[in-house]
Image: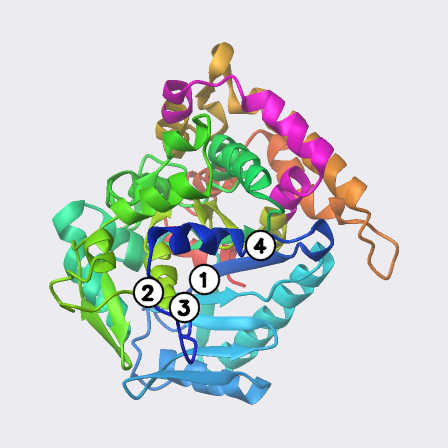
């Protein structure tokens, strides 16, 4: 949820056609396709597991400042360091201080996993200095909303005020969750549409395989991915499975119309966020935005606005896969492997589409609704469950990675990054179920043991 750094000059938008054309600017030849991996983690004090505030000694600000020693450059907002930029992308803050690495666009999974390793080595070294740990989980296992700090970022203040008006769990999404995401390229409008459809249809499988948020406020919450459940009542105007993506003729224009109908959050001007929550970008296009009368948007405003829609797959000038819970380092590498294998090889993409193309809107929605609670036992078309197809989907992904033939220095291709997911299918238990087994077993009902289990 970090706002892009505005360009020095962003041209004004004169017509709706410019909005549509912005997606075409993301088209790239296959040779230029890259992988951008984003992952969030919870920050906590080793002494008592509290979530450190921005200002406290050894807190979030000090962590960011210490990272500058590794060559990261600070991003300042109203006098506060709120992000860092560097060769490995950017480090940013989620609303309650969750640390996020938005990785650089890289050629292969060996590079993206090495990038993840560098980042984790840096934060662990700094954490040791300040008595801070980092937790790979999809939701805070024991914190109430009131126990969590707020970061000094202008857009978050606007969102925190607006969320309770449109859903019961938006504040939980902002304050209590972490995710892993991957950003992927497309060659043409048709290629984008096909990848979008496969990504949406199989996003619940990714949610199940990565389900890792079974605890709320110290107890089991009845879900395997409570993080995914939270999205079901965050803000219906900007979330969901987007049935129109599967309609004939879907492309850039239809997604632009969807985004135009998503209510605004803010406008960024002169280093400040102007509250535009609930207002219409269509009015903005006509110079009729109440908070900026007579002014029309720029392409930077459109880019910012696109970042405030939160469907299961999101289009910018690339596609974002958004269904996975946060987790430990090997699953950070597994998530991009899963999607790169499915979407970056033509044969794999065709095979994946053949598996899901006959699912109805109702079947896809039922699957999305069931997967937070049932995981791999969630029902799919034909009286089957996700468990019945998970191995086959991983085989398709593995074949796609093999076809890419990206080798590391040891001569290994990218298929090994799928091993954590193979283990889920082999064991029959998603990560949350393994945690619940320990909670009811060796942990003796003490959820604080998760800090030892999943500390980076």
Q: Residues within 10 Å of mark 3 (few under 14, many from 20)?
A: many
Residue displayed at 59% across by 51% down: 185
Residue displayed at 40% across by 45% down: 213
Find disc 3 in the rendering and name its residue.
43
Q: Earlier in the sequence, mark 2 or mark 4?
A: 2
Q: In front: mark 4 or mark 3? A: 4
Q: Earlier in the sequence, mark 2 or mark 3?
A: 3
Find disc 4 in the rendering and name its residue.
332
Q: How many marks?
A: 4
Locate the N terminus by quadrant.
bottom left
Range of the magenta residues? 337-365
Q: Earlier in the sequence, mark 4 or mark 3?
A: 3
Q: Residues within 10 Å of mark 1 (few under 14, many from 20)?
A: many
Find disc 2 in the rendering and name its residue.
301
Q: Secondary structure at mark 2?
A: helix
Q: Secondary structure at mark 1?
A: strand
Distance from disc 1 to disc 4, alpha carbons, whole Å, reads: 11 Å
**Depth check: 194 or 323 in front?**
194
Proximity of marks 1 and 3: CB atoms separated by less than 8 Å: yes
Give the percent coordinates (x, y) of residue 413. Answer: 81, 49
Q: Is 273 on the left or on the right of 108, as rendered?
A: left
Q: Which mark is residue 41?
A: 1
Locate the C terminus by quadrant.
bottom right
Q: Is residue 196 magenta?
A: no
Give the percent coordinates (x, y) of residue 299. Answer: 38, 64
Residue displayed at 65% across by 61% down: 112
């Amino acid at each position: 949820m970090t706002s892009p750094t505005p360009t020095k000059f962003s041209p004004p938008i004169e017509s709706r056609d410019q909005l549509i054309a912005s997606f075409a600017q993301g088209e790239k030849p296959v040779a230029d396709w890259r992988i951008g991996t984003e992952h969030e983690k919870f920050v906590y004090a080793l002494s008592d597991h509290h979530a450190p505030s921005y200002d406290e000694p050894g807190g979030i600000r000090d962590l960011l400042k210490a990272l500058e020693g590794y060559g990261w450059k600070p991003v300042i907002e109203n006098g506060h360091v709120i992000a860092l930029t560097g060769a490995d992308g950017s480090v940013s803050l989620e609303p309650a201080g969750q640390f996020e690495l938005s990785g650089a666009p890289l050629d292969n999974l060996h590079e993206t996993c090495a990038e993840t390793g560098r980042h984790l080595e840096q934060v662990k070294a700094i954490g040791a200095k300040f008595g801070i740990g980092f937790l790979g989980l999809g939701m805070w296992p024991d914190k109430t909303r009131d126990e969590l700090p707020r970061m000094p970022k202008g857009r978050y203040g606007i969102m925190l005020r607006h969320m309770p008006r449109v859903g019961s769990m938006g504040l939980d999404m902002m304050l209590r969750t972490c995710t892993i995401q991957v950003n992927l390229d497309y060659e043409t409008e048709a290629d984008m549409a096909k990848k979008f459809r496969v990504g949406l249809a199989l996003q619940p499988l990714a949610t199940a395989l990565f389900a890792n948020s079974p605890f709320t406020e110290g107890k089991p919450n009845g879900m395997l991915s409570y993080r995914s459940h939270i999205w079901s009542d965050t803000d219906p105007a900007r979330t969901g499975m987007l049935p129109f993506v599967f309609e004939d003729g879907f492309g850039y224009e239809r997604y632009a119309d969807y985004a135009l109908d998503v209510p605004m959050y803010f406008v960024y001007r002169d280093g400040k966020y102007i509250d535009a929550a609930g207002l219409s970008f269509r009015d903005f296009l006509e110079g009729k935005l109440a908070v900026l009368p007579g002014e029309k948007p720029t392409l930077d405003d459109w880019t910012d606005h696109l970042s405030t829609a939160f469907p299961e797959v999101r289009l910018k000038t690339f596609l974002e896969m958004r269904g996975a819970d946060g987790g430990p380092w090997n699953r950070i590498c597994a998530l991009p492997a899963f999607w790169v294998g499915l979407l970056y090889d033509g044969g794999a993409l065709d095979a994946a589409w053949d598996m899901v193309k006959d699912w109805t809107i109702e079947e896809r929605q039922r699957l999305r609704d069931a997967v937070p609670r049932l995981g791999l036992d969630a029902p799919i078309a034909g009286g089957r469950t996700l468990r019945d197809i998970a191995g086959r989907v991983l085989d398709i992904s593995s074949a796609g990675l093999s076809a890419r033939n990206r080798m590391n220095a040891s001569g290994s291709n990218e298929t090994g990054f799928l091993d954590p997911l193979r283990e889920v299918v082999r064991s029959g238990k998603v990560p949350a179920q393994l945690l619940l087994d320990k909670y009811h077993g060796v942990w003796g009902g003490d959820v604080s043991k998760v800090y030892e289990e999943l500390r980076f």
